[in-house]
Amino acid sequence: MALTNKQRSFLKQRAHSLHPVIQLGEAGLTEAVEAATEDALAHHELIKVRFQQGDRVERRELARSLCDRTGAQLVQEIGRIAVLYRPAEDPGIQLPPS
């Protein structure tokens, strides 16, 4: 499921007030980080992830790899923060129509 620009904008607005719930440190993308991200996405649907290390290209690759592993969509990247979205089985966030 690809997000439309309208849906992406809607999710960016919702994510503005959120605080990062996942932090990737020097160990990088481990199984523990992946499991914690799975739990956070299942509970919140929309989360922020903070990357502690790496340059812009490395952080982008880590964010995309995390999305691939968890089935999430990358909504936005700003500096060291990435916003991820994955709808729950019973979605609490209603996206605008495409």
Image: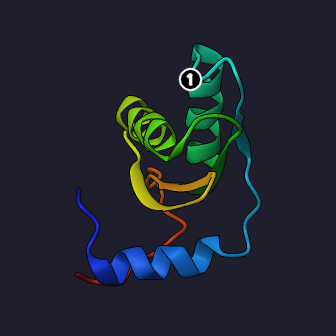
> From the image, which quarter does the N terminus lie in?
bottom left
Viewer-side residue, 37 vs 94: 37
x and y percent of residue 46 in the render?
57, 59
**Residue at the image point whose x is 50% and y is 47% from the top:** 56
Residue 59 in percent (x, y) is at: 51, 41
Q: State the residue position of label 1.
A: 29
Q: Nearer the viewer, residue 85 or 5?
A: 5
Q: Is residue 28 left or right of residue 58?
A: right
Judge left or right: residue 54 versus residue 10. Answer: right
Measured from the top left, where is residue 92 in percent x and y?
55, 66
* Disc 1, SS: loop
Residue found at the very far front of the displayed protein:
55
Figure check: 33 above or below 92 = above
Name the quadrant containing residue 14.
bottom right
Q: Quadrant of residue 25?
A: top right
Q: Nearer the viewer, residue 3 or 94?
A: 3
Residue density around tag 1, few if under 14, some if 14–19, many if 20 or more, within 10 Å: some
The residue depicted at 66 percent of the width and 75 percent of the height is 16
How many numbered discs? Answer: 1
Screen quadrant of the C terminus: bottom left
- The colouring scheme, among rainbow, by chain, secondary structure or one colour, is rainbow
- Quick check: 38 above or below 72? above
Q: Amino acid at mark 1?
A: Leu
Provide residue 84's location: percent of width, then percent of height: 50, 53
